[in-house]
Image: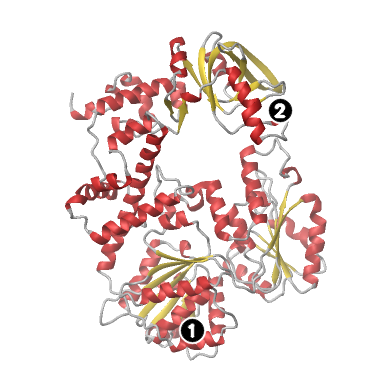
Amino acid sequence: MDQKQEYETQYIKGVGPQKAKVLAAAGLKTLEDLIYYFPYAYLDRRSVKRIDELYHTLFTEETSNKYESASFKQIKLHREYTIVGKIVKKTKRVISGNRQMLIIEITDESRARANIIFFNRIEYYYKFYNDGDYVAISGYPDIGRYNEINFVHPEIENIDIEDVEFYQQGGILPKYTMPEIFVKAKISQKQLRKIITNALDKIGNTIEETLPDYILQKFNFPPKMKAIKNMHFPDNFELLEISRERFKFEEMLMFFLAIFSLRQAQIKSQKGLIIPRNSPNVKQLYKQLPFKLTNDQIKALQDIMNDFNSGIPMNRLLQGDVGSGKTIVALIAMLAVIDAGYQVVLMAPTEILAQQHYNTISNYLKNFDIKITLLLGGLRANHRDEILCSIADGNSQIIIGTHALIQDDIAFRNLGFIVIDEQHRFGVTQKAELIELAKKSHTELEIFPHTLFMSATPIPRTLSMTLYGDLDVSVIREMPKNRKPIQTKVVFDENRNSVYEFTRQQIKMGRQAYIVYPLVEKSEKLNYKSAIEHYEYIKKIFKEFNVGLLHGQMPPSEKDEVMYKFLNKEFDILVATTVVEVGIDVPNATVMIIEDAEKFGLSQLHQLRGRVGRSQYQSYCILFTKSNFQYKIKSKRIDPNERIAAIKRLRTMEETTDGFKIAEVDLEIRGPGDILGTRQSGLPAFKFINLIEDIEIITKAREFAQGILTNDPKLNKIENVVLKQSLKKYLSNDFDFYGIA
């Protein structure tokens, strides 16, 4: 038998060719695959109870402490219990229409009884489990209508009669994810445990250690092979926890070592511009600002100025909620660079945003001798040529535009600072092209520009540390003092008229309103409201006002025209789709009405809400939802999990306007992959780390990685040989971040 065969699953005791095919279909092709197929949960056999003991527990300990005011019939416990017993009866029962339920009744030596209830795969369970079978079940029991104990869709496992005593002796059993293909092949939890036990025996101690001794000793981590065994069959939960922490720490340590070492290699070959702190233009702007900067804005500026003086090209993310004042921070930094004799560029994802930046900056700098240029697509040839000449000879000091800034015929003159707004909307290639143009603009030396990325999408700290691991991050959480928090209210359909009347009063006071719909046109498949369908309806409701329509199917020029008309108060109400999620500021708009609000994601709701509250006026966000979607009403038409998530989103919107808190809830509900798009963002699919819960481990691993590379940049010291080998493997096999590896 060759070495390859030695490590194939079919040669493990208890597997064979047929089971090997089933395992392979689930991604378990080798011994190593099997030993890293860690359990998703554990069964503490020490918590195995007799059924009569469970009755006592449910009606005393559980209920007295947590459910004093609840009816026993409504109790749903949040602690897992295990019982072992014999099946004495199976009953199929029709619930409604063709829908059935299966009740399996079990008893044990106490002669008390409990029910196992299934609503899905009834025929399978009915055939598979028979009267007289011994089973171990684990789940969350509840108290039924007649004070009976019910386990609904619990973990269930056939056991031999001799195993009954074994279960009751104590210990910890792993519970593995069981794909459908395992169930069809009749591979049980018990069989999988035996297969993995045999795999561990076969592989022995041949797994190489991937962490150096000093890390194992510092954190009291077990060696790798011992940690693997603890993950499957721990003697106690303390050993399980420290083993799990080892894998989480190692995963993040490798991630940050990869990020920082790649960045280190880039920085070494890059020379940055030195920008003096003492800027006359900055001093002049400070004097004429009609407001004081917040503490977060000042801190962000300090971070930027430190970067400017480091001799290393700045690579910083400025993160802040909509309206937090990122633009003024970027402008102050721009003025410092201009005073040092260099050009600056601000690139925005859309023409309308670029135009808004141009207007805002022009207004701030109307008393300054600084030439600001706006470069957009579709300009007349002679006008474009004039602009290009002005950029090339250095007369244009601030250039604002879209991706039109990275055309082949554009030449900058000593471009020293690049600001990229809504940076997540630009690809890696576009950013790199702009940096290349900046490098070419320096005739004497190859100098890299400073780069500031801005994002109005708040991201939780854990995600920021991982997704932007190669960036320095400054966060603006404070909102300007003159901004009033937006009042947000969930409103059900039956109260629609009162909302319309409120909106009418706001408009009569001189304000404006958005009404946002989830769809452009009516859909036969989706029961959502659409903008085009309701545009005429809204015009009739508000016949005394001017109503505009905006949606994503319009040509760009038409969309811009509508938005400018709304900005100039030619429209009192704008009926729109989510195309307004990113748009120009309309300070006069104070009402945001969102139809079918339960259908929107949390971050999207927050972005839409951010279209109002842009001035000193009190603003309002109304979240319309269906009457049958009220918090305590169950609806057969709505999936329970979907309803729970939607309720959480709506409640969160009512409770807070803090974008970062909202982002944390969104992360909890959807997970990082759904929020960012794992491949799109470049964020690896972490196997062990929980980006919601494991902030301490993430922080510890990040700091440790920085410390290691500070003392040993190339990992050449003898104590880091193991770490260097592990990192090489990580970079070659698993690492795909920002397209640089």
Picture disc at residue 105: none
Q: Secondary structure at mark 2?
A: helix
| Residue count near mark 1 (Cα–Cα under 10 Å), binned few <14, some 14–19, many ≥20 | some
Q: Is residue 132 left or right of residue 268?
A: right
Q: Quadrant of the N terminus?
A: top left
Q: Which residue is mark 1?
A: 372
Q: How many marks?
A: 2
Could you say which quadrant of the image residue 554 lies in? bottom right
Residue at the image point whose x is 66% and y is 51% from the top: 650
Q: Is residue 477 visible?
A: yes
The residue most toward the top is 132
Alpha carbon separation for disc pair 1 and 2:
71 Å
Q: Quadrant of the C terminus?
A: bottom left
Q: Secondary structure at mark 1?
A: strand
Residue 548, placed above or below residue 201: below
The amino acid on which the numbered mark 2 sits, given as a three-letter code, is Lys
Picture disc at residue 73: 2
Q: Nearer the viewer, residue 731 or 345?
A: 731
The amino acid on which the numbered mark 1 sits, given as a three-letter code, is Ile
Marked residue nearer the N-terminal end (1 or 2): 2
Q: Is residue 602 left or right of residue 416?
A: right
Q: Is residue 520 visible?
A: no
Residue 25, how many percent across, how many down? 38, 29
Q: Is residue 227 left or right of residue 304?
A: left
Residue at the image point whose x is 64% and y is 37% from the top: 640
